[in-house]
Amino acid sequence: MLTEQQLQMVQLAGVTISALSLVFLVVYVWKTWEIANETKRYTLEARRSTYALATLNLMHEWQFELGNLREETAAKLGELRALANQPNPPTLSSLYSQYPGAFQISHFFYQVGAIVLAGHVDEDLIVCYLAGSTLFWWQELAPFIQAERKTRPGGLYREYFEDFARRVAARPHSERLKTERFSTNGLDRESVLQPEALSTLVD
């Protein structure tokens, strides 16, 4: 038979064990939450690094790898516009032998649109960097892309290029002007297409 003092000691031990269990549970939950937050933070940092690298790669490709092709194609815009204004413009793929730049530029923006749609790059930065060029080249190449779609099953061709052009066109004009981002430094880095000049194909 336990004495009253022994019963009190047993009760005290039970309360102590319960308190320690509660403390352990609180510490366990807190540590689990802390680890989850750290894991999330590291995941976000890794994702940002991946996004930054992908964005820089696209910028490098546009500026350097496609530089000469862009210049050559821009020099032939008069010829391309004459073809685009025909009642039945040629398909984009049929222009490859004579105007390879037109095909490569459209492919570049197709890739950009696909990566942006998948969320694998910094869309704000890409829009700031490529907005004017995107709308300009969509306007120039859309007639040939539309002609190509008529020959394709399902009518799909360069759809990610068009989607990206629509995303850019939907942005407030100030977000599309790279020149405005640098205006405080007196720099004029790129002449961009004004919104009133946009093709109805982007509207």
Image (spheres, rainbow, N blue to C red):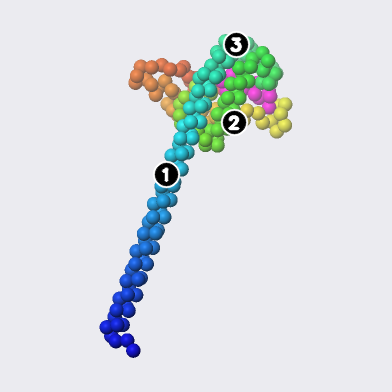
**Which residue is disc 3 drawn over?**
76
- The mark total stands at 3
**Kind of residue at disc 3:** Lys
Q: Position of residue 169 (x, y in %)?
A: 51, 28
Note whether 74 is above or below 202 in the view shown. Answer: above
Q: Of label 1 and label 3, which has the lower sequence position? A: 1
Q: Does residue 76 appear in this view?
A: yes
Q: Quadrant of the N terminus?
A: bottom left
- The quadrant holding residue 106 is top right
Residue in the picture at 44% in, 47% down: 39
Residue under label 1: 41
At 40% from the left and 54% from the top, the residue drawn is 33
Give the position of the C terminus as an image quadrant: top right
The three-letter code of the residue at mark 2 reads Tyr
The front one of 130 and 145 is: 130
**Magenta stretch in the rendered image:** 137-149
Residue 199: which quarter of the image? Answer: top right
Residue 194: x %, y % from top left: 48, 20
Residue at 39%, 59% (x, y): give it.
28
The Cα atoms of the two marked residues, 1 and 3, are separated by 49 Å
Q: Position of residue 103 (x, y in %)?
A: 63, 20
Res. 131 visible in picture:
no
Residue 160 is tagged as: 2
Q: Does label 2 or label 1 sit earlier along the sequence?
A: 1
Query: What crowding class fits label 3: few (fewer than 14 Cα within 10 Å), some (14-19), or many (20 or more)?
Result: some
Q: Earlier in the sequence, mark 3 or mark 2?
A: 3
Marks 3 and 2 close (CB-CB < 8 Å): no
